Amino acid sequence: MSAPLDLPFDPISRAGELWTEHFGSAAAMRVATSIMRAQQLLLTRFDRILKPYQLTFARYEALVLLHFSRAGQLPLSVIGERLMVHPTSVTNTVDRLVAQGFVARRPNPRDGRGVLACLTDSGRATVRRATDDLMRDGFGLGSYDEPQLDEMFELLRELRLAAGDFSEPG
């Protein structure tokens, strides 16, 4: 878990100055390092908000994905693809959600070997309450207004597109 450091200076700005002296332009390094630190801070915040529900952010994301699905159930392979995680991580996440009573495992009628993760009533209620709490917090991004959030999303979307996370239609 990462906590605020309360330093009297910005260590990423300072690293940027040193980087420029030793290696050249620090722009990309400063942004990449800032994104990584922001991720640590946000995950810490999300974990604190989700703790009363005994959820991690990864488990919360799986519940939301199931909540969004038409029938409240998805094959584990689809969950992994949509959440962009390894099959082992999906199995672990679903196992924990099953143990909590938020998800049930069922055989996939379309695939004799496959398994469906099915959102339970308890899981549906929990995801709604947890989402209310995260929304009240602004997902940790309450210091930004809507246009700033839209701009950040578009900038990071370009990075994900260039990395091959998805392709643009057309």
Image (cartoon, rainbow, N blue to C red):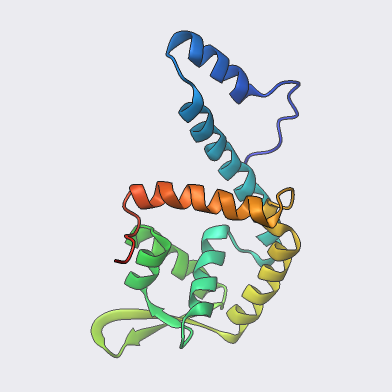
Front one among 59 and 136: 136
The image quarter containing residue 139 is bottom right
Does residue 21 sit above or below 47 in this rendering? above
Residue at the (29%, 90%) spot, across then down? 109
- Residue located farthest toward the front when viewing the structure as drawn: 170
> Residue 99 placed where, x, y %?
52, 72
> Residue 103 placed where, x, y %?
51, 78
Front one among 26 and 76: 26
Residue at the (49%, 77%) spot, across then down? 66
- Residue located farthest toward the bottom when viewing the structure as drawn: 109
Does residue 113 sit above or below 147 in this rendering? below
How many numbered discs sit on the rendered protein?
Answer: 0
- Residue located farthest toward the top when viewing the structure as drawn: 21
Residue at the (56%, 66%) spot, across then down? 60
- In the image, 135: left or right of 13? right
Does residue 144 sit above or below 60 in this rendering? above
The image quarter containing residue 132 is bottom right
> Residue 46 placed where, x, y %?
65, 55
Front one among 121 and 166: 166
Whether residue 43 appears in this view of the structure is yes
Residue at the (49%, 34%) spot, across then down? 32
> Which quadrant does the C terminus fall into?
bottom left
- In the image, 42: left or right of 112? right
> Which quadrant does the N terminus fall into?
top right
Whether residue 91 appears in this view of the structure is no
- In the image, 31: left or right of 41? left
